[in-house]
Image (tube, rainbow, N blue to C red):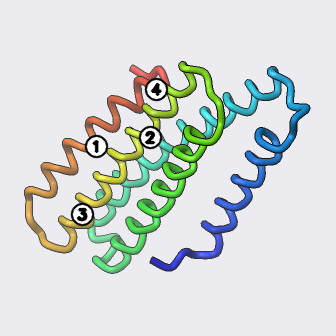
Amino acid sequence: MKRNKPMGLIKSLGLILLIELALINPSLTLAQEEILLETLGATTAQGLFLTHMAIGTLVDGYAAKAYDKEKAIQIMDAYIQISQSTKDGLNKLLTSYPLSEEDTRYLRRIISTYDLLIASAHDVKAFINTGNKSHVEAYTKDRDQAWAQISDLLGLK
């Protein structure tokens, strides 16, 4: 799939920031590193929440005929691409940067939640393409599981 320029720029800037602040800068203090990881965790968790909401909003908009099939698929593809890029970056962080056991567990939970969001987006696309109601059931299951994880990660109840 061809990457759009804004997504590539966002990904590149994020990677540059992470490398500059965490991997290349040997003078990074433990306190600075902690702030960096907390900020990364907070923004990534925010991304989970907003992606969950965005997918649901697109579903509602498609059901209300605010989006045609082509536009709905185009937007859902963007959600999938952004989520996959984020997940890939988090996986790189897990394999290339020494993290505490707690941070590793937290990132793995975020990654598994992105898996559910990506699956729910694919479920929506499958429904839009086929009209088969089994995809709605799969979407609901994936969406509910993602929300349970998001609310737990963010301390929402």
Q: Circle 1 sits on which residue? A: 143
Crowdedness near tag 3: few (<14), some (14–19) or many (≥20) residues, C-alpha within 10 Å: few
Q: Secondary structure at mark 4?
A: helix
Q: Quadrant of residue 102?
A: top right
Q: In 3D space, how far apart are the residues under numbered discs 3 and 1 (Cα atoms)? A: 17 Å
- The residue that appears at 26% across and 66% down in the rendered structure is 125
- The residue that appears at 32% across and 45% down in the rendered structure is 116
- Using the image, tell me which numbered label, if any, was put on residue 63: 3
Q: Amino acid at mark 4?
A: Leu
Please report whichever mark, 1 or 4, sits nearer to the chain's N-terminal start.
1
Q: Circle 4 sits on which residue? A: 153
Q: Secondary structure at mark 2?
A: helix
Q: Quadrant of the N terminus?
A: bottom left
Residue 89, image x, y percentages: 57, 50
Q: Secondary structure at mark 3?
A: helix
Nearer to us in this view, 128 or 34: 34
Residue 10, image x, y percentages: 67, 61
Q: Amino acid at mark 2?
A: Ile
Q: Circle 2 sits on which residue? A: 111
Q: Quadrant of the C terminus?
A: top left
